[in-house]
């Protein structure tokens, strides 16, 4: 049919559909009164450019309310309608249709599904008590607002994208089998520039052990008490900004990596890289930058390379080898600094795999410190160390002096001191051509500037 129009003097109407009803043009226009439609196991369709107007729909018992035809060119819209999907009821968007500014409530097995190039537009969607919103194909969430609570979930799969959506996740786990999450990005999906807040809910990128390459893209993700973000398979944190507050957590598994994302831990927030082998299964894992007062676990045999996003950050918390829970095998983890920013480590760190500063060439800052500490005592050469040091220094002298001067401020007397004057003090005795370093502060509290 063409459409329904309710004039300004219309009454409140109800309609029940148990078989099928299709709006091919026009759709529903409500200028007065109201129309409440119950889809009880039937089919309601909106094709071409039809609109649901300001109608209200309740779809249940396996019924389907569908906008557009699969892989078509339809531009139908949900308008400003309201939709309740329960007991296996589905509202679906196909082709190039959109959810307009409509409101959706998915409960008790009800779902909203977007496929092809459809869009959630500026819709408001609530998933609770087993309700689900599913994005497939290249569907986009656009600027929709989604809330998960009490077992509700939203899943992105194939090449779908969260766009500029806002998702609040307090799901306490969702209905997706194998991943007890409120938000899942699977296969090649992306979080876009979405804002995601996890409150007692989990967001997962990739399925455990799968081939997924999902990405957090440029999303803003905040994990509060009981909230977490998990990266599985070959997923990456991309260029996201991920904040982990007290009681929140981020964990990496399989071959996932932090990409160039910015990680900020506050209070007791944690980030654990220990269960990932890195994209190439060689223990090489990256994070654009790390900061904050929480705890970072590198993982046994892993090397965590940070600084690729060029930000200057400070970690006042702890960087450790592995979690004390025994969730991953014990062993040393290493830290590598790259990029143009300054990394300041002002906490009491316990990782034992050493620190590397990468800049065209790489060297281990802790190994250099040990080398000099063996040869120096209170700024004076030990007689038994002079011979050993001279044997090793000839080939290294120029390179070591250049590297120290490149990462620590140097004055006219040949003194090289860290920006904050806390951790390493270098003295170049030009007359005897010796390079001596003595330690001030804690050994692993090394800050460096890559140039």
Image (cartoon, rainbow, N blue to C red):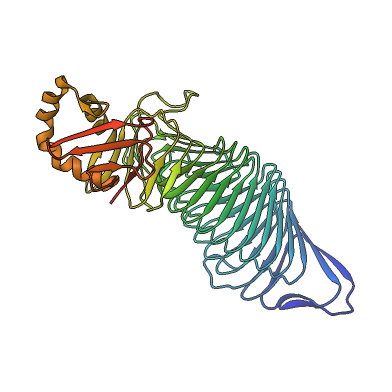
In the rendered image, the quadrant that contains the N terminus is bottom right
Q: Which one is nearer the viewer's eye here, 26 or 205?
A: 205
In percent of width and height, residue 427 lies at 23, 37
Position of 367 compared to 48: left or right?
Answer: left
Q: Residue at x 81, y 78 (%)?
A: 31
349, 431: nearer the viewer:
431
Please indicate, yes or no, whether residue 1 appears anywhere in the rendered image.
Answer: no
Which is more toward the observer, 367 or 172?
367
**Relative depth, front residue between 220 and 45:** 220
Would residue 132 be visible to someone looking at this image? yes
Q: Is residue 227 left or right of residue 317?
A: right
In the image, residue 185 above or below residue 430: below
Where's residue 360, x and y in %?
22, 49
Vertical relation: 378 (above or below) 309: above
Q: Is residue 276 left or right of residue 131?
A: left
Question: Whole-percent x and y of residue 213?
Answer: 42, 49
Q: Position of residue 314 (x, y in %)?
A: 44, 43
Relative horizontal placement of residue 357, taking residue 258 as reference (left or right):
left
């Amino acid at each position: 049919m063409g459409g329904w129009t309710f004039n300004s003097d219309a009454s409140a109407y109800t309609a029940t559909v148990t078989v099928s009803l299709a709006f091919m043009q026009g759709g529903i226009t409500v200028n007065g009164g109201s129309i409440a439609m119950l889809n009880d196991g039937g089919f309601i369709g909106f094709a071409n450019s039809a609109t649901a107007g300001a109608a209200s729909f309740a779809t249940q018992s396996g019924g389907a309310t569908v906008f557009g035809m699969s892989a078509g060119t339809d531009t139908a819209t949900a308008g400003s309608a309201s939709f309740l999907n329960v007991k296996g009821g589905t509202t679906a968007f196909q082709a190039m249709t959109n959810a307009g500014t409509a409101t959706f409530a998915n409960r008790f097995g009800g779902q909203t599904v977007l496929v092809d190039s459809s869009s959630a537009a500026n819709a408001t969607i609530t998933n609770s008590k087993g309700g689900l919103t599913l994005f497939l194909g290249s569907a986009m969430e656009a600027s929709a607002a989604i809330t998960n609570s009490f077992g509700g979930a939203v899943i992105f799969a194939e090449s779908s994208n969260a766009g500029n959506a806002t998702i609040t996740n307090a799901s306490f786990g969702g209905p997706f089998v194998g991943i007890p999450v409120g938000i899942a990005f699977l296969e090649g999906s992306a979080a876009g520039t979405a804002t995601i807040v996890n409150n007692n809910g989990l967001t997962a990128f990739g399925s455990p052990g799968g081939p997924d390459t999902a990405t957090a893209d440029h999303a803003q993700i905040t994990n509060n008490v009981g909230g977490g973000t998990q990266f599985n398979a070959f997923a990456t944190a991309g260029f996201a900004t991920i904040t982990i507050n007290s009681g929140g957590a981020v964990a990496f598994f399989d071959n996932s990596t932090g990409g160039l994302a910015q990680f900020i831990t506050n209070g007791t927030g944690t980030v654990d890289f220990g269960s990932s082998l890195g994209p190439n299964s060689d223990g090489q894992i990256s994070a654009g930058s790390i900061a904050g007062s929480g705890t970072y676990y590198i993982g046994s045999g892993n090397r965590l390379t940070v600084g690729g996003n060029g930000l200057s950050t400070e970690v006042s918390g702890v960087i450790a080898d592995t979690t004390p829970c025994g969730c991953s095998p014990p062993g040393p983890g290493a830290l590598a600094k790259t990029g143009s920013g300054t990394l300041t480590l002002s906490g009491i760190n316990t990782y034992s795999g050493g620190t590397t500063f990468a800049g065209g060439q790489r060297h281990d800052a802790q190994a250099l410190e040990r080398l000099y500490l063996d040869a120096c005592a209170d700024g004076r050469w030990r007689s038994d160390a002079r011979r050993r040091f001279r044997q090793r220094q000839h080939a290294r002298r120029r390179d070591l002096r250049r590297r120290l001067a490149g990462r620590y401020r140097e004055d006219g007397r040949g003194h090289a001191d860290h920006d904050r004057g806390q951790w390493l003090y270098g003295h170049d005795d030009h007359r005897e051509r010796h390079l001596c370093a003595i330690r001030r502060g804690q050994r692993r509290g090394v800050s460096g500037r890559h140039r």
